[in-house]
Amino acid sequence: MPHGTTTGTWSNWAGNQTARPARAVAPGSAEEIAETVRRAAEQGQRVKAVGSGHSFTAIASAGDAVLVRPDALTAVRSLDREAGTVTVESGLPLSRLNRLLAAAGLSLTNMGDIEVQTVAGATSTGTHGTGRDSGSLAAQIRAVEIVLADGSIRTCSPTEDPELFQGARLGLGALGVVSALTFAVEPAFLLTAHEKPMRFDEVLAGFDDLASVNEHFEFYWFPHTDLCTTKRNNRSPGPAAPLPGFRAWLDDDFLSNTVWEGVCRVGRRFPAAIPTIAQVAGRAWSERTYTDTAYKVFTSPRKVRFIEMEYAVPREAATTVLRELKALVERSDWRISFPVEVRVAPADDLWLSTASGRDSVYIAVHLYRGTADSGYFSEVERLMTAHQGRPHWGKLHTRDAEYLAGAYPHFGDFTALRDKVDPGRVFANDYLRRVLGD
């Protein structure tokens, strides 16, 4: 039997999604997952696997279902230096994977800006960083082990069950329970980070150059201002020159988390003060350059809790959308305390990747927890969808299967695969019914 059977209320990191599953289990192997799935099917129950709860949507919500927790699925199964791969169980947090790889002199090619997610949760929702040439975490997968609705354990790759592989790399939890993943890895490398304040119009005028000259470019725009902070990360031959411990703590923990939490609370209590706060915050970030191990540059701690919406728009539409977004904020009476985050990604071939078949720019908007949304997200979504935007699967949006079928060239391929491997919808929930249809 899978160990750790419990009941109780599940909630996500942001606290905006809760569920009360029929029961929760923490299987320790693919065989125990299979047993859980078979038993649930016999009892007419659904099954939902969860990760660290870092999705803002209800994609992992397991109301009345059997909730599969990842806690006991954290082993590193194999590390093949010659092949350049590592195989790990689905519940391993990215933070541990990064450190295990670094100890072995290896690294993922690209990653997002937080590392608390489980590997399966991050890849199943399309978690990504920013990259000129390198894509999302799911794009770095070389094989998937997954438990299907009939209780079978299947391994798929580009050469073994390639159709299942195409869907399972980024499967939304709709095809089965992922039990292990094989990632491509490479020799460890250093990144030099150059962070520099710039004006909004200056960033947009040079956006194409900034995104093409730098391996990893992103920027943050502070609403109610024309202030931006830009980040350029490029590979370096070394030597390493990390931020001094105190400076790293001051900038990336104390200012970015402790002080920012206080600022957001003030803004929530006194919305009229937010434009002034934004001016101060936008000027607080000074230029800095440092060189460090890749994962330490890619990622940073995120302790201030918020809710988020993010859309991927075609690369060629990005500057138009950003100018329209700035105009939208300026003519509204919103008071937005969180910066807008902008990142880039190359086209990939994953069926449900937000960058599927097209070079993309990601535009993310946030609200501090407990802040009333007076139309900000819905108006931003209207703007994004007017430009063929694709919503991040783990971040708030209102799109449904009809819209998404028109946004993804391979949407029909994915739903046909789902019909084949989960005809009884063992892994369905309300969110998947909305975005994939029933």
Image: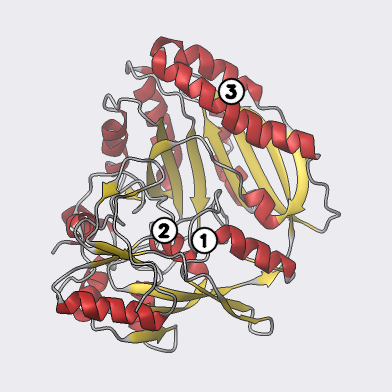
Distance between the alpha carbons at the discs numbered 2 and 3:
30 Å
Above or below, comparing residue 383 to residue 423 in the picture = above
Q: In the figure, is residue 291 to the left or right of 179?
A: right
Image coords of residue 17 (percent x, y): 30, 45
Three-letter code, disc 1: Gly
Image coords of residue 108 (percent x, y): 62, 65
- Give the residue at x 41% y 26%: 326
Above or below, comparing residue 154 to residue 199 in the picture = below
Q: Earlier in the sequence, mark 2 or mark 1?
A: 1
On the image, numbered disc 2 is attached to which residue?
Answer: 355
Image coords of residue 305 (percent x, y): 45, 36
> Residue 205 or 163: which is nearer the viewer?
163
On the image, numbered disc 1 is attached to which residue?
Answer: 135
Q: Which of marks 3 and 1 is nearer the N terminus?
A: 1
Q: In the figure, is residue 312 to the left or right of 295?
A: left
Three-letter code, disc 3: Gly
Q: How is the image coloured?
A: secondary structure
